[in-house]
Image (cartoon, grey):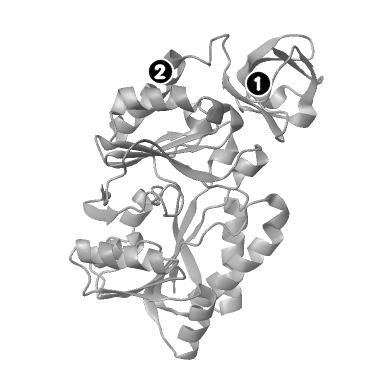
Amino acid sequence: MDVFLSAGRERRVRTGHPWVFSNEIARVDGQAAPGDAVAVHTAKGEFLGVGHFNPQSLISIRLLSTRREDIDSADFFRERISRALAYRRTLYGDLDGLRLVYGESDFLPGLVVDRYGPVLSLQFLSLGMDKRRSLIVGALQELLQPQAIVARNDVGVRDLEGLPQQIEVLRGEVPEEVVVRENGLSFAVDILGGQKTGHFLDQKENHMALRERVAGGRVLDLFCYSGAWAVHAAHFGAREVLGIDISPGALDLARGNAARNALAQLCSFRQGDVFEVLRDLAARGERFDTIVLDPPAFVKSKKRLTEAVRGYLTINRRAIELLEPGGFLFTCSCSHHMQRDLFLDTLRQAALKARRTLRLIEVGGQALDHPVLLACPETEYLKCAILQAV
């Protein structure tokens, strides 16, 4: 099947971006069913690449190759996944907690594969990838021999592809306990019920930035989830760490992870709405030497951006008000739509409203196993700004 773009609508694809939007398509020759592989051409007939077609989605084509090749073969997926694995091994060796495939950045748009020890946790985010799950699972089984393969397809983006949200065990049996290592520390992972695919793998390098900044200090970890920031802070010498999350299940994980690393005596965890907890801490005159703000994505679509900026502004202002002089704020945004410049401007406004002077120490991004495809800015989403109150 062949798809032809409207005149002049091929420019973004020529730069290496793998998406074709529905309003860029002029015509489809042949009977292309949703999820089929199609060849993409310019209006004049010049070949641009091959990809998965879904006329029900705003992103109607996700390109997998700029060559004429069979993207429906076991060999294709085995080769692509092998390349992704080789890249991670050069970075982390045989680390047991990794993002092995990161969609567009690994030239497999719509596919995420995370490794948690003996378990692989997958997300099929596009119809094209979902229809090829047997090829993908077969390649992963051959290359990695996991004990279990799980599909964490409980994500809203599947609605846009006309796919159901669900969690499935595709192969094997998930162990009763799954524990992974990060920076020499151990963390239990909730494979079937945890956030994302079970654990946050994208903050590995940012966690290390706590070292030499928290020793002897009092630390507040907001939206603490399973306690990765809190446990790292205690490990790096904090005298006291308080973690806050609204989820009882997350707090159980966090307490278990603190105990697993022999740091339970330094870490306490409390259930609560972070916005309300911040107000309460301020009313009681509490102060902290380091505060970590790692909230879920406040903005999941561009039309909600203004509302999200208000949320980031409020929560950062309240956190800044609790900082001791010389204290550090580690504040994050995991939304692509909240781009770096806007995020930093929001932090400037938050400092102004808090009547505090802050200096920007550094801005981190997502871990190296979440590489950014330069031609596809949507693959860059995580910002971790480290600020100091002066």
Horizontal relation, residue 323 to residue 188: left or right: right
The CA span between labels 1 and 2 is 24 Å
Instruction: Characterize the local packing of mark 1: few (<14), some (14-19) or many (20 or more) Cα atoms within 10 angstroms.
Output: few
- Report x, y in % for residue 118: 27, 39
x then y, percent, for residue 4:
76, 16
Quarter of the rendering containing residue 250 = bottom left
Res. 14 mark: 1
Mark 2 belongs to which amino acid?
Answer: Glu
Q: Which of these two is toward me, 173 or 125?
A: 173
Please state which of residues 299 and 324 is positioned toward the viewer in this rendering. 299
Name the image quarter holding residue 164. Answer: top right
Q: Is residue 335 above or below residue 219?
A: above
Q: In the rendered view, tell whether residue 271 sits above or below residue 172.
A: below
Q: Is residue 102 above or below residue 345?
A: above
Q: Position of residue 328 (x, y in %)?
A: 40, 69
70 up-or-down from 246: above or below: above
In this view, the residue in front, 148 or 346, is 148
Question: For the point 40% across and 51% down, which residue is it?
Answer: 200
Q: Which mark is residue 79?
A: 2
What SS does tag 1 mark?
Answer: helix
**What residue appears at the point 58 percent right and 15 percent down from the top-left corner?**
66
Amino acid type of the residue that numbered disc 1 sits on in the rendered structure: Arg
Are the residues at dot 1 and dot 2 in contact (C-beta closer than 8 Å)? no
